[in-house]
Amino acid sequence: MWTKKAVVLLSGALRLGALQPWRTIASRQSSTTSHTVNSIILRSLKDHYVEVSKMTPPPKISPPSPYSVVKGALDSGGPVLKGEFQDEEISISVMRMADFGGSGDETGDDGINQLFLHVDISKPGQEESLHFLCGLYPDALGIHSVSLRAKAESSGYLVVPSKYNGPVFEDIDEKVRDALHGYIEERGITESLFPFLQAWLYVKDHRDLMRWFKTVGTFVNESNQEALQA
């Protein structure tokens, strides 16, 4: 005789057995869909990686004297060039004007035609550096602002200013503006920097893009392996 408890257990087991195959099928269908989507992404990433890897790099250009490339600059967000003038140390960082919040109407040479320079000039024994923010073009360089900033000695990066950052450059007397332009020109901060920095940005962008394809592809591929094992 079947006891009431045994009947209940058997009934529950039968229901579970009836439902489990559908759960398994749904799980397999989900895994299959995920695998298909991941495969499409991986194939697209690979195609674009190959296409980008075939792009012709710009001719190798050396920076103008007295500047040299900062070691590891391609893999960091810090200064690109460093140089010396008398007892001064000069570092130069660069970015696209569009990245800084420009109009985005750049044309030619893959859009790297308008650049922003952060020029930091420091002297030994002084806690602050003279900082110039400049716009750099193929045939011109203009100063946007001049300020004194504390320098973080441990990292070499500029600290965000916490005090008066100087007047609007266009509001300064014309003679003072001309003198400040002469000051940075004497230190080699001119449009002569443009060809090198334009080529450097191209190489950095290409390098970052290739790295992006690799890292995203690696992540998706690991997800793909997990989907196959599910």
Image (spheres, rainbow, N blue to C red):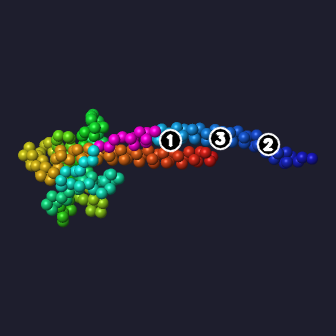
Q: Position of residue 218 (x, y in %)?
A: 49, 48
State left or right for residue 20 relative to residue 113: right
Q: Amino acid at mark 1?
A: Leu
Residue at 27% x, 44% y: name it: 59
Q: Secondary structure at mark 3?
A: helix
Q: Secondary structure at mark 1?
A: helix
Gap between marks 3 and 2 measured at Cα: 22 Å
Give the numbered dot on residue 145.
none
- For mark 3, what is the residue? 28
- For mark 2, what is the residue? 14
Determine whether label 1 and label 3 are within 8 Å by CB: no
Q: Amino acid at mark 3?
A: Arg
Q: Nearer the viewer, residue 191 or 89?
A: 191
Query: Measured along the vertical axis of the image, is residue 123 above or below residue 197?
Result: below
Residue at 23% x, 50% y: name it: 62
Give the numbered dot on residue 42.
1
Tell me the crowding category of disc 3: few under 14, some 14 to 19, or many 20 or more residues within 10 angstroms, Cα based. Answer: some
Residue at 61% x, 41% y: name it: 31
Q: Specify the segment rendered in magenta.
A: 47-58
Q: Nearer the viewer, residue 132 or 94?
A: 94
